[in-house]
Amino acid sequence: MLSLAVVMGLGRFAFTPLMPMMLHEARINLQEASWLASANYFGYLLGAILCMLQPIVWKRYQLRPLSSARMVRSALIAIACLTALMANDNSESWTYLRFITGSVTAIGFVYTSSWCLAHLAQRNASTTGGIIYAGPGVGIAVSGLFASVMVVYDFHAAQGWCAFGLLAAIVTLIVWRIFHDDESSPEITHQQTHITLTGGTNGEKIALTAAYGLAGFGYIITATFLPVIARAALPGSIWPDLFWPILGVGVACGAILSSRIAAHIDQRQLLIICYVMQALGVVLSNWMPNLLGFAIGSILVGLPFTAITFFVMQLGRNLHPQSAASMIGLLTASFGACQIAGPPVAAYLLSQTVDQQQGFSWALDLAAISLLIGAMIYVGMIKTHPHHTKQPSK
């Protein structure tokens, strides 16, 4: 959980609460902010692809693959350093730093997930994996609260980047000894899997990959611009900087709740509920552009955020148990590819409208539609690929 708090909450999303500070200091404008965000997401896609191809390359050249533990440790160190380096005044370097950070983020996410889920599967405790995915929510909430305090005390954005880099380093030291080399780390087997698909597994892999990609586009505009959207809708209010940590709390709570759901329940049904809930949260600020609308919307976007990831990763492992890291990499690549489109789409719509609020409104409507399409894909999966449940082997 703490590892993903650094990897996702800081490495990936530290830019969101610091963006208003950078805009206020005229270090960037909204167009530049959109491309900085996309650079991070491009890097995330590249990192996911590297994870997907890593087993093939290692096998082809008969190399000994690096352990998941070493990959996680390396990612944590890199994120702490790259985050702190964003404090430099050379704006031309920011794009490269965010791109590299995105690549490292994907690697850290894939190998943290692979390492943790494998150990939980060995202990017949796969459903508790939701606790792992509370990490991004913890990171989002903490970074958001830190940024809110910094705004109150007139900190500069550069100081914020340094503070987040230091925080990442401290957490890395805390979890360092947990991620030890263990060459016997298990890969889950078909006999240990709670859900066995009864046919059409290739079709289900494609559908799952596509649906998870739509989730990437559906949430990313809110996840990138929430504080900016809220400031535009509620000028002069003290609340806009707090909606991001509220979303983070929702992320953490949703992940923990997902770990309490019985393993025999079809995860595709749960994903339908999650997608619809998140779609409602995304557009609620359009329907209710006030304090209540943003607060409820932030919770509805946050609650299913990592629950979606947890359920999809479990399904992915069940579909491809022999090479879980590769399957997780494929899913993460799809997610990464679709989320790249979010900030440029928002920037384009902003350029085509007379005011900022209308541009963001159109972007959020489009994001919600993509989530509803994703939910319909899961409906189709349930109809075309039925499954039966079995008890895990002892």
Image (cartoon, grey):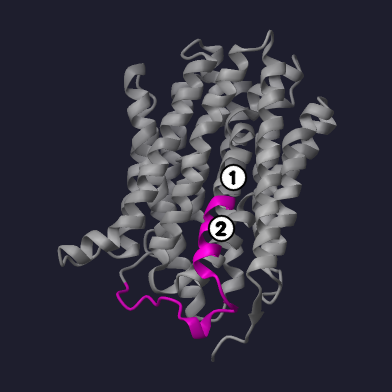
Which residue is located at x 34 percent, y 67 percent?
180
Figure disc tally: 2
Looking at the rendered image, the quarter that the C terminus falls into is: bottom right
Q: Which mark is residue 321?
A: none
Residue farthest along the top direction in this orientation: 354
Query: From the viewer's perspective, is residue 39 above or below residue 338?
Result: above
Vertical relation: 227 (above or below) 138: above
Q: Which residue is mark 2?
A: 208
Residue denoted by label 1: 214
- Amino acid carrying mark 1 in the image: Leu
Q: Quadrant of residue 166?
A: top left
- Secondary structure under tag 1 reads helix
User: Disc 2 and disc 1: Cα gap in Å?
Assistant: 10 Å
For label 1, the crowd category at 10 Å Cα-Cα, with few meaning under 14, some 14 to 19 and many 20 or more, is: many
Q: Foreground residue, 113 or 140?
A: 113
Amino acid carrying label 2: it is: Leu
Which region is colored magenta? 182-211
Near mark 2 (Cα within 10 A), the count class, few <14, some 14-19 or many ≥20, is many
The single residue placed furthest to the bottom in the displayed view is 394
From where the camera sits, is residue 175 visible?
Answer: no
Answer with left or right where residue 322 lies relative to residue 134: left
Residue 253 on the magenta segment: no
* Kind of element beneath mark 2: helix
Please name the residue shown 71% across and 61% down the image: 270
| Image quarter of residue 300 | top right
Instruction: Say whether residue 226 is left or right of residue 19.
Output: right
Residue 81: x and y in percent read: 34, 38
